[in-house]
Amino acid sequence: MNLTSLRLLSLLFFGGAIADAQNFAGDMALSKVLLKGENWERMASGYGFTDGAASDEAGNFYFSGRRNEVGSIFKIDPSGNVSTYISDASGISGLQFGPDQRLYGTRWGKNDIVFFDAHGSMNTIAKGDHPNDLVITSQGQLFFTNADGVSSLSPEQTPRLVAKGIKGANGISLSPDQGTLIVSEYSGKQVWAYRVETDGNLNYGEPYMTMRLPAGSGTAKGDGATTDVEGRYYVTSALGIQMFDATGRISGVISKPSREGISNVEFAGEGHRYLYVTSGGNVYRRLTKTSGLRFQHALKESNQRE
């Protein structure tokens, strides 16, 4: 387990203050990530509703959307070229590649957890109560948010509910060492944190991070989530992308690219340095100073250091 996760778990278990939390000035921490003069660039438009942000090792970005009322998965390469990746994939709300290089997805409206084979065919592997978004560890442990909370799905197992009490569990991501899992609330204002156990259970859950709210609203509409190599967490919300440092301290809110809502977020592009968002029928990106977390890559480097 790395240092940032130990700091996080020290709060989860002991509630202690962390003296070396970065940037006590608050929003100034955004300057550690955002580049001066860089803004959002629209990469794709006209897709009805976009969601299911994912990336691969090469920096390609994947998203679900509709063209002519047909639901598909689309790919944007690091140069910005858009192509259809899988032509028949309706209702996808979450996407991620697993350690077996397969693309996995959730279908909120169909209650399915699926994977796509080498021919692009969609295969249902389990059922869930409105599965929303998902994350997969380097060991193949799949976690997905749903109407009841968070469920765990291991190979050759049926889904098990491993966390509940979350107000509209939605976005989900992992810490760099995969020892901590976070979940955003769509119908509340908290981002929960849990310790990930080797058997697929989640323990010591706490509403660890608090999102900022729109004026006069009691819900943040926390949606998609991702993590960068420094352990910062990014959660889409009604206000924009809320960024938290590795200790759970809010660093600020990155503005939305337009007035439309943001459904999901992921790092992709060259060096995984671009922050991509799905918003309305569009996809936008902006260059950052950091890079996105690639779980398999990070684990390989960790093993080499040991």
Image (tube, helix red, strand yellow):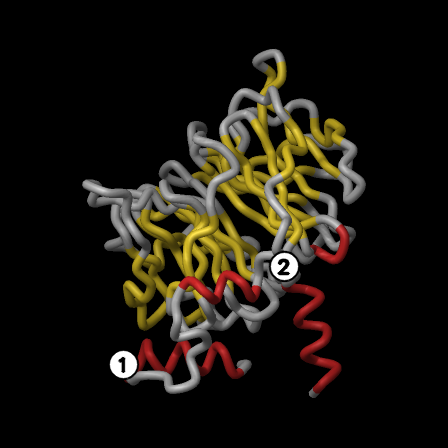
Q: Which residue is mark 1?
A: 15
**Residue 230 placed where, x, y %?**
57, 70
Cα separation, mark 2 vs mark 1, equals: 28 Å
User: Viewed as shown, does residue 180 lie left or right of 38?
Assistant: left
Q: Which mark is residue 115?
A: none
Q: Is residue 97 visible?
A: no
Amino acid type, label 1: Gly
Q: Which mark is residue 292?
A: 2
- Secondary-structure class at tag 1: loop
Q: Nearer the viewer, residue 66 or 211?
A: 211
Q: Nearer the viewer, residue 96 or 99?
A: 96
The residue positioned farthest toward the top in the image shown? 68
Amino acid type, label 2: Gly
Number of numbered callouts drawn:
2
**Residue 142 placed where, x, y %?**
52, 55
**Residue 178 placed where, x, y %?**
53, 69
Which of the 4 image quadrants contains residue 40?
top right
Q: Which residue is at 39% across, 56% downward?
A: 183
Asked if residue 42 is positioned above or below residue 8 in the image, the reply reads above
**Which image quarter is the C terminus in?**
bottom right
